[in-house]
Image: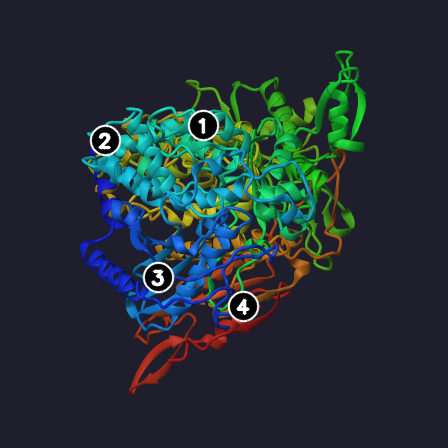
Amino acid sequence: LFHSSLLRLQIEELLKEVTLKETKKKKIDAFLHEINAFISPAPPQLTDQTWLPGDVKVPFLQVPFDVKGKFRFLPPAQLSVVGSYLLGTCIKPEINVDVAVTMPREVFQDKDNLNQRYHRKRALYLAHIAHHLSKERLFGSVKFAYMNSNHLKPILLLRPQGKDEKLVTVRLHACPALGFFKPSRFHPSKNNVRTAWFMEQSSPKEAAHPTLQQLCDTVLLSHLFFLSTASTDFLGMKDDVALLKVWLNQRQLSKGLGCFSGFLVSMLVAYLLMKRKIVRVMSGYQVLRNVLQFLATTDLSVMGISLMKDVDASLPALADFHQAFEVVFVDPSGLVNLCADMTASKYHQVQSEAKRSMEILDDRMVDGFQVLLMTPKPMLRTFDHVFHRKHVSKLQSACKKIELMDRGGNYVAAALPFIVSLLARGLAGRALLVAHSLPQTPEWPIDAEPPKHKDVGPLTFGLLFVPEFAASTLEKGPQADRPEAVEFWNFWGEKSELRRFQDGTICEAVVWEASTVCQKRLIPEQIVRHLRGWATCGCTCALGEEAVVSIVCSYDDLSHKLWNLEGLPLTVTAVQGVHLALRYTDVFPPIPMKPIYSFHNQIRTKRLLLPSEEKPCPAYIAPLKIICHMEGSGRWPQDKEAIKRIKTAFHLQLAELLQQQHQLICRPAVTHTDVYKDGYVFHLQVAYHQEPLILKEVVTPEGMLKYQDTEESQQLELETLHWPYLTSSLHGLQQQHPVFGSSCRLAKRWVSAQLLSDSISEECVDLLVASLFLHPAPFTPPSSPQVGFLRFLSLLVTFDWNNNPLIVNLNAGLTGEQCTEIKNKFMAARSRLPVIFIATPKDQWSSVWTRERPSAQILQRLLVLASESLRALEEQLMDPLGSQDIVFCPPLDIYDVLIHLNSKQIPRHLESVDRPVKSFSRGVVKNSAGVNVLFPVVDYDPVQCYLQELRDAFSDLALFFYDKHGGEVIVVLWKPLSFQPFKVSNMKGRMVTTVNNKLVCVPNVEAILEDFEVLGAGLVKRVEARTEKWTI
């Protein structure tokens, strides 16, 4: 009955959490009885709207205002509870109870089905009830709202007084007396809104949509009876409807105009039961699977379905409904289309979500419960590009009058299908899915005018891309002599032009201007802007992809040269790059540089350069580390010191041979050889595969030889085994997902901007982002950097780091059994493991990238910052005029001391978030080729040297944080325990004082602050003390 025992328990707990408790049901029942007592004896009123007091407005947009007919209020003929409350399928947190208020026949007149007369009487009826109930103390609030944001269906919201105000919302629906309207008047092709009345001119076009609300109101009780019959002896239905409502809520599909509501879900389950696709003995989980499978495989926009049991020739056929509506699901009466307001685009989004959900449920490696029912999917994290239409009132001029009549004047609903079809056609081949947000109208006080159509706010459209074609610069059309060519030209306008292709054909084509990877990524935005006026949202594209490609090409050429070197005593067996740029995740990839000699002091005897004290610090040149594995041989010694000397000899010989055979400038050292090639500096390090094992050898006092991990062996394994494997795996991931590298770089830039880059390793961030691409459920892998970044922040905030390991299955190297074993061992040894535990196929048990950092306190700080950044960024992205840079500006109010730096001595100053418009020369020029140049200064960053000195001297007193990418301030946080007075023999940084007549040592803060300046002479501009936390 369930996928697993764990899933059964999870679903049972979720159902307990979302369903109503008996005590609350009793309170709600009592509230409903009191409402019944108040509404029934309401006094009658006369006709016209002048009787309405000034504190109540009619909850209806009366355009045009003049209409025939009279209104007379009479007490309700009947009050009936309908909907999910009686069926037991309503779920928390929002408990809504629907009550049908039946209006007596005497309220109506003949032809009330015409020209919105019924809708206006209905609104007036509710307005009178609202005025009557607003005087009663029983209610905490009495407000109007539109049912599912449909302006033709106002309802009255009643909430209890006092502490129970949030317990329940009672929704009053005014309904006509049963049998008053003839069903034949509501055929989909019948016209119930006269053209001459609505448009003040004649037209043969008929309208279907406005009649629907009358139909829906007449069948509320029959729908309740139908669902009640279906749910009898079917416990699985209640559970399934509750689960599907949670599923829809998490995907933002259950609220708004044209939503896939909980009522629609209940009717769909009843349909599947009627068609015997499900049976009453099924569990909630089995019904859930069947409903999702049906949604995934059935397109109701092409072939609708009906709940009618018998065919009736007098009733409209499905084909009639398809002519009037985009999505068709007919109710048991055969007259009402339950999906009347839904667009085909929204149904296709539901279909897409159902398909993805079935894939997740069938995947044993994924926790289906967590990702399907517990993970929210807002549009910003679901879709690759999101566009906003801000001024929706301008859509009115784009709609034909006849379309507005179809929608009762709602130009937003009338324009949506056209906009979506326009986008779908313009992005055909690029977008898997074009979706739109659901227009939602907020509730309003009874003394306020009803919201207008423009009050739904901006319309949002989401695009889900086909990664291979999203960035294509060419839109190839039909051949010039085909009839379709005219249609293609009419659609694209002047953008379309004739072009000859390599196969000899001459076709209409559209070419989009884009030279860089970043610009190509924004081609869909160019298309959307060309099709219509839009505002767009999205982070600024991460730059630097071209720089990485240049580095990889230079690295490949150097690898080829190393493989083919002649004169080495042992052959090269492998060349592996381990630098961040070679896995596409370096925030600022190195660019080719050539030093300016006037900014340096020259040591001509060694052909070396030193930074000049009189000039600004030269730009930072990062060495690109490469591991060069030599073949195994009996000539390798077995002593670790001897191996180091042999490696040094190889470094010298490699430098000599590269210089002789390929004229490369080299600078050998004991532990490595630096090679200057194409303006880059490669840091070449020789490795011998047996060396880590030899470093593990330990001789016991008894003279026995045993093997155990040492700090030296672990570091060597990290450099020669883990780094190369990680780099090659992530390089492969980049080839599969082109935005992986850019997403990583955004994430790392954010971590560094929050001053935490020294507190969490770059490899850890790489793996966190990699998990979003390898295990994206419930999403699809990101196809834009900003989506990857948003999901990175969400992962930090929502993942349970204390109770779960993060398993990153690189190259699909782990089986399901291995993943289960990792989880079990993790729980057994949790207290001894790092606060973030990341398991990969080559590192299942030790989590080498998080073993030393972050600490528990740093992780907590990271989660707080991620939570605030995610909230702020999503708010700003939904407002296209906002700036997204604010999430890259760290809050400094919690720190005790700020050490302001001299920008001239910051070598990475141009990498800062607030990048200076103009800067001074940095002693290097961009250069891709240089043969006879002196070796540049490599890996020189005086700020990092200063930071290391501070940590060496004062790590027992304070923590130091810095943004390594051009930050102008080092922030200091005092350690609270260091300021507790105590007796100690070590006087470093402390002074003697008297506390309670006892001599104790306390930190000498004034002297320490002075030391900060002395240590950073020339680099430090000033030291600013922000707090007085050190006061004893």
Give the spatial CA distance, label 1 vs label 3: 40 Å
Q: Identify the residue position indicated by label 2 in the image.
A: 2
The image quadrant of residue 561 is: top right
Q: Does any portion of residue 627 appear in the rendered image?
A: no
How packed is label 2: few (under 14 Cα within 10 Å), some, or many (20 or more)? some
Nearer to us of marks 3 and 4 is: 3
How packed is label 1: few (under 14 Cα within 10 Å), some, or many (20 or more)? some
Q: Secondary structure at mark 1?
A: loop
Give the spatial CA distance, label 2 vs label 1: 31 Å
Q: Secondary structure at mark 3?
A: loop
Q: Position of residue 187 (x, y in %)?
A: 49, 34
Q: Identify the residue position indicated by label 4 in the image.
A: 898
Above or below residue 818? Residue 522 is below
Q: Position of residue 129 (x, y in %)?
A: 39, 64
Above or below residue 971? Residue 270 is above
* Label disc, if present, on residue 304 of the rendered structure: 1
Q: Earlier in the sequence, mark 1 or mark 3?
A: 3
Name the residue furthest top: 503
